[in-house]
Amino acid sequence: MTTTISIRLEEDLVCKLRQAATRERMSVNQFIVEAATDACARALDGPSAYDALADVIGCIDSAGRFDASRADDEFADGLAAQAVEGRL
């Protein structure tokens, strides 16, 4: 089953789509469907943000003393410490 959708594109992008589709010897519709399919695969088939960060989530024990209102300061302090140690 297919569905028709309507999207707004800048005229210069429409021209590029037509040129690219012609170069690839396919219709503009085929070109857009293939591009959308590839973009969805990249976005959905890879690891989620949680999966990508799973090894570092929860790796620091704050012992209940972390103040979330100072998160930006804590992060900056951590980066500064890494820079001093040559790890950044």
Image (cartoon, rainbow, N blue to C red):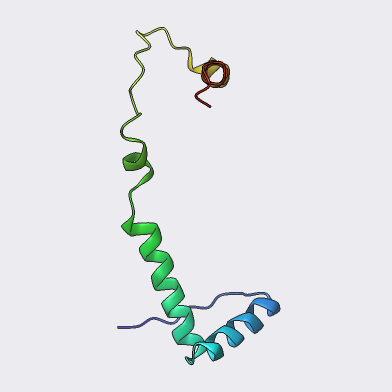
For image coordinates 66% across by 84% down, the residue present is 15
Q: Position of residue 60 (x, y in %)?
A: 36, 17
Q: Position of residue 13 (x, y in %)?
A: 64, 76
Task: Return the residue found at the far front.
Answer: 86
Q: Is residue 60 above or below residue 18?
A: above
For image coordinates 31% across by 35% down, the residue present is 54
Q: Quadrant of residue 20?
A: bottom right
Left or right of 77, for residue 60: left
Left or right of 33, for residue 14: right
| Nearer to me, 26 or 87 | 87
For image coordinates 34% across by 54% down, the residue present is 46
Question: Can you say which quadrant of the picture contains the N terminus?
Answer: bottom left
How many numbered markers are drawn?
Answer: 0
Q: Is residue 57 above or below residue 84?
A: below
Q: Position of residue 62 (x, y in %)?
A: 38, 11
Q: Position of residue 12 (x, y in %)?
A: 70, 78
| Nearer to me, 86 or 74 | 86
For image coordinates 35% across by 47% down, the residue present is 48
Q: Is residue 52 above or below residue 56?
A: below
Q: Is residue 80 above or below residue 31?
A: above
